[in-house]
Image (cartoon, rainbow, N blue to C red):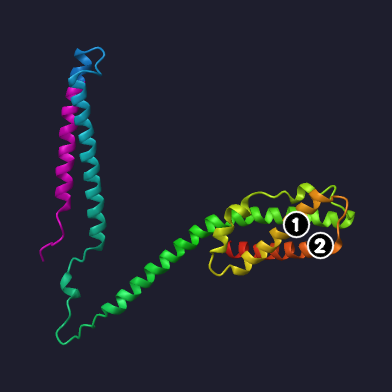
Amino acid sequence: MKDLRPGLPDGCGFWLGTAAFFAALGAIGITIAVTEYHPPWPSAWFIAGSVLCALGCVAATWALVLYLAHKEAGRRWCPNPSTHAPRAGQRVPATRPRETAAARAGAILKAADAIGRGELARWLRPVLREINGDLRQAAVGIEQACRDRSYWDVRHEFDLGQTWEGNRRRLAALEGCGDLYDTLRDAYAGIARMRRMAAGSPGLAEDKDLAGVLEAVRKAQAAVGNELAELG
């Protein structure tokens, strides 16, 4: 049976011969430039030889690409296509273009959803880690204020970074994270109140205010920890 595979080896041979031709001409030009000119770099012979050598490299690269493509096609090419033709009396299974299109669309949507989750995780993970550090720092300050019944030594624990303020709108817009946003909002509001109290009357700390804020902070820490665990 006649071999119906494409004649890619001929294409490889042609481009290899072209590469050798260009390389030979380029070598001649560079040799003349090196022999006749000092320095040889600005001479037309050297420039022309370099260009021809570059063209030879391009042709050789293209020959390699054709060779590899033919090799891959050879592994997949069927030497006897008639074996795949339907036999007499054999029913050809009906195609289901709608189901196939739906499956492809579903695969595309799943891939897009995976990419979206990856982008979200790359932004959300470091933000939540910074917020978790703020909450941990504030919790330490509240616990010390409870023990000392004053804010004298804990005023700096309530000076938090700008991570929450810089990302609160984006956090509020997250779907399915309403509880996380609400707990963070309550915790940061309580910490801000503690900061004002520490600045106004550092020598007095009321237990009921401290206990309520500490509970909000602990709740926010648990919500952040759960979200970080889901992000991985």
Q: Residues within 10 Å of mark 2 (few under 14, many from 20)?
A: some
Instruction: Name the magenta segment's main secondary structure.
Output: helix
Q: Quadrant of residue 28?
A: top left
Picture disc at residue 26: none
Q: Give the residue drawn at x 58%, y 67%.
A: 177
Residue 196 visible in the displayed image: yes
Depth order, front residue of 137/55: 137
**70 relative to 173 in the view: left or right:** left
Depth order, front residue of 161/31: 161
Spot occupied by residue 93 in the image (x, y as percentages of width and height): 23, 83
Q: Give the residue drawn at x 73%, y 61%.
A: 217
Instruction: Please tell me which of labels 2 and 1 falls first in the chain.
Output: 1
- Asked if the residues shown at circle 2 and circle 1 are in contact, with their CB atoms under 8 angstroms apart, the answer is yes
Residue position marked by numbered label 1 in the rendering = 193
Q: Is residue 170 magenta?
A: no
Spot occupied by residue 149 in the image (x, y as percentages of width and height): 89, 55
Helix, strand or loop for disc 1: helix
Magenta segment, which residues?
1-30
Spot occupied by residue 194 in the image (x, y as percentages of width and height): 77, 55
Quarter of the picture holding the N terminus: bottom left
Q: Give the residue drawn at x 16%, y 60%.
A: 5
Picture disc at residue 209: 2
Residue 225 visible in the displayed image: no
| Circle 2: residue type | Asp
Q: How many numbered markers are drawn? A: 2
